[in-house]
């Protein structure tokens, strides 16, 4: 039986928090990569990971194009949950290229690759498991994912994959977690300013194009 099949069988019956507990009991913490976009539902996984492994590094990829509200939200959660956030970004000359070239207007895949995928690829080199907060209900692309997905260079771990929208809301409410300021303005999924519009679930991301993922999770 492939390694991830056995893991999926074991973890599926557990709730998200117990999945995280088992992961941190089973793998050395230094092998576990956790990234967060500090988007609309990020607080759930941030709270859970910090509960299971307080102080575990949380990597934030600064694309240089985030909403002011996202940066404020990151600082608010950092203070409230005492998070250990480590920021990373594209090499300055590469990011600058996407600014001067306005790459986000005519080649969004390249812009995402430079500002998101490459910085995360660097992080992946030093880790074996990558925790990500993907949720099945967010789009059709995510419906078929498993809790563990073996990729060429890393094993992806999606502990909250099967949480419903109501369960996410309830968790945020029960744990007194703050909400991203843009949620109250009609944004459901929040990425960069150039590529995010108001809308239900992820329909506001790269609206008007065929793009549905930034490239990190495909
Ligand atoms: S979401 Fe838009 S602005 Fe952000 S990195 Fe991707 S293309 Fe560039």
Image (cartoon, rainbow, N blue to C red):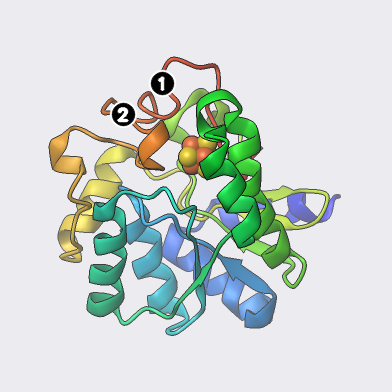
Residue 115 visible in this rendered orientation of the protein = no
For image coordinates 57% across by 72% down, the residue present is 22
For image coordinates 66% across by 81% down, the residue present is 30
| The quadrant where residue 130 appears | bottom right
Q: Position of residue 12 (x, y in %)?
A: 56, 51
**Alpha carbons under labels 1 and 2: distance apart:** 7 Å
Is the Cβ of the residue at disc 1 closer than 8 Å to that at disc 2?
yes
Q: Is residue 165 left or right of residue 133?
A: left
* Vertical side of 40 occupied by 59: above or below: below
For image coordinates 22% across by 52% down, the residue present is 180
Q: Position of residue 169 (x, y in %)?
A: 22, 47
Q: Secondary structure at mark 2?
A: loop
Q: Is residue 110 left or right of residue 173?
A: right
For image coordinates 56% across by 62% down, the residue present is 89
* Vertical side of 63 occupied by 125: above or below: below
Residue 174 visible in this rendered orientation of the protein = yes
Q: Is residue 48 left or right of residue 128?
A: left
Task: Provide the residue designation for mark 2.
Answer: 197
Task: Provide the residue designation for mark 1.
Answer: 207
Q: Position of residue 46 (x, y in %)?
A: 38, 66
């Amino acid at each position: 039986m492939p390694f991830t099949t056995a893991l999926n069988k074991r973890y599926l019956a557990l709730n998200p928090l117990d999945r995280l507990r088992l992961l941190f009991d089973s793998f050395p913490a230094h092998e576990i990569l956790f990234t967060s976009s500090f988007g609309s539902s990020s607080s759930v996984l941030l709270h859970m990971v910090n509960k299971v492994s307080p102080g575990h590094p949380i990597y934030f990829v600064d694309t240089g194009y985030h909403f002011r509200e996202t940066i404020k939200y990151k600082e608010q959660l950092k203070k409230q949950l005492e998070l250990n956030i480590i920021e990373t970004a594209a090499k300055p000359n590469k990011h600058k290229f996407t600014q001067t070239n306005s790459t986000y207007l005519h080649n969004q895949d390249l812009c995402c690759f430079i500002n998101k995928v490459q910085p995360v690829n660097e992080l992946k080199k030093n880790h074996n498991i990558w925790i990500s907060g993907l949720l099945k209900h967010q789009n059709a692309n995510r419906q078929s994912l498993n809790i563990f997905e073996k990729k060429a260079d890393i094993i992806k771990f999606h502990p909250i994959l099967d949480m419903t929208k109501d369960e996410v809301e309830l968790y945020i409410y029960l744990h007194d977690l703050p909400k991203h300021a843009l949620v109250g303005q009609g944004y459901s999924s929040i990425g960069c300013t150039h590529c995010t519009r108001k809308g239900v679930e992820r329909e506001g991301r790269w609206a008007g194009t065929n793009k549905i993922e930034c490239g990190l999770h495909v």
